[in-house]
């Protein structure tokens, strides 16, 4: 597939820019790529962000190898300065960050300053991405140092994340309304929030950075600290949420499984 070859050539040429100090690819570098359904995300560490013209000049050298080039699809913030090249139907996104801002954000997350989801973004997901980044280029130890920074899960972060998320799984007022009115659509909005906090509490008691809900079953299968039959019970909670005849069963199981995770978390506290 041409996308891999083109990506590697782009990495090689971008690394010649003296502003760029490290390039890493997130996710499974050997994953099968499906046109229209797959993407490749590249994190680029810089002293200063190369200008749009500088970036475009590199991309244009390979204009016959991509069908579209979208510049500045994001313009600073948690996704950096991002450009997308569509190669063989695969979105290849280069996200540029200064090393300073990347390190600053990682420190903030590690210190528990970003506990909750921010829009559709999980701050601990950035820690997960950096921890497992595939280093394609670094001028010195730019990526290696950041990986070392996040590799050891801080005990204080576990405590803050677990306390925050386990205490927000159950909204007693809303769940009381669900039990009383048995409104399926209302319960789904409540359950969405509950499951989000529940999963983040689960990842915390396993000292793993919550990346997103993708591949949840795979992660949960490997976890040591979890209630018995946790994933199957989650599916049952969701299954019972679709009918007003079984909503009460769903809520009761949600409360039970939350209590079990709380007990596991408290047990871990006592051992620290």
Image (cartoon, rainbow, N blue to C red):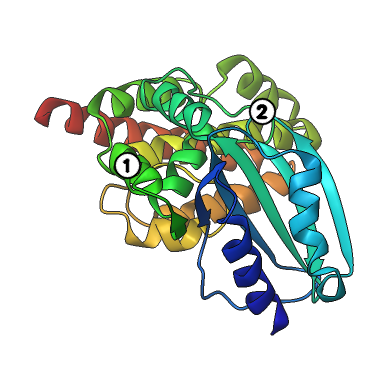
- Circle nearer the viewer, 1 or 2: 1
Where is 1 relative to 184, above or below?
Answer: below
In front of the other: 231 or 24: 24
43 horizontally vs 120: left or right: left
Query: Residue placed farthest to the right in the image?
Result: 67
Judging by the rendered image, the residue that carries numbered circle 2 is 77
Which secondary structure lies at badge 1? helix
Query: Residue placed farthest to the left in the image?
Result: 271
Please tell me which residue is depicted at 73% across the width and 48% down the height of the picture: 242
Question: How would you rate the neighbour count of disc 1 (Cα within 10 Å): few for under 14, some for 14-19, many for 20 or more?
Answer: few
Where is 201 relative to 237, above or below?
Answer: above
Q: Report the number of numbered marks.
A: 2
Res 171 visible = yes
Where is 13 relative to 212, above or below?
Answer: below
In front of the other: 18 or 99: 18
Please tell me which residue is depicted at 55% across the width and 39% down the height of the picture: 46
Judging by the rendered image, the residue that carries numbered circle 1 is 145
**Residue 63 appears in which quarter of the rendering?**
bottom right
How far across and down, in percent of the image, does residue 80 sit? Answer: 65, 36
Query: Residue placed farthest to the bottom in the image?
Result: 1
Give the quadrant of the N terminus: bottom right
Res 232 visible = no
In front of the other: 126 or 177: 126
How far across and down, in percent of the image, does residue 61 sit? Answer: 79, 66
In front of the other: 190 or 222: 222
Please tell me which residue is depicted at 33% across the width and 48% down the height of the picture: 144
Which secondary structure lies at badge 2? loop
How far across and down, in percent of the image, does residue 101 sit? Answer: 52, 27
215 horizontally vs 64: left or right: left
Which badge, 1 or 2, comes first in the chain's sequence?
Answer: 2
Please tell me which residue is depicted at 53% across the width and 56% down the height of the picture: 26
């Amino acid at each position: 597939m041409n996308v891999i070859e083109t990506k590697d050539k782009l990495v090689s040429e971008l690394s010649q820019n003296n502003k760029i100090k490290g390039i890493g690819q997130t996710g499974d570098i050997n994953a099968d790529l499906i046109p229209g359904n797959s993407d490749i995300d590249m994190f680029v560490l810089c002293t200063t962000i190369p200008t749009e013209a500088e970036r475009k000049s590199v991309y244009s050298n390979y204009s016959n190898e991509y069908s579209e080039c979208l510049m500045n699809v994001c313009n600073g913030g948690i996704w950096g300065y991002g450009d997308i090249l569509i190669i063989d139907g695969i979105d290849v996104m280069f996200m540029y960050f200064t090393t300073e801002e990347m390190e600053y954000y990682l420190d903030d997350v590690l210190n528990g300053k970003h506990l909750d989801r921010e829009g559709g973004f999980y701050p601990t997901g950035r820690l997960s991405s950096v921890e497992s980044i595939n280093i394609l280029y670094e001028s010195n130890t730019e990526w290696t140092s950041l990986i070392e920074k996040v590799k050891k899960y801080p005990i204080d972060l576990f405590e803050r994340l677990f306390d925050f998320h386990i205490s927000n799984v159950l909204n007693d007022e809303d769940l009381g309304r669900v039990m009383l009115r048995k409104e399926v659509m209302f319960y789904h909005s409540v359950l969405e929030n509950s499951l989000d906090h529940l999963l983040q509490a689960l990842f915390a008691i396993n000292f793993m950075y919550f990346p997103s809900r993708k591949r949840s079953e795979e992660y949960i299968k490997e976890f040591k600290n979890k209630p018995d039959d946790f994933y199957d019970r989650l599916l049952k909670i969701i299954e019972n949420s679709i009918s007003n005849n079984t909503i009460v069963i769903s809520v009761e199981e949600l409360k039970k499984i939350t209590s079990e995770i709380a007990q596991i978390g408290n047990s871990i506290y006592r051992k620290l």
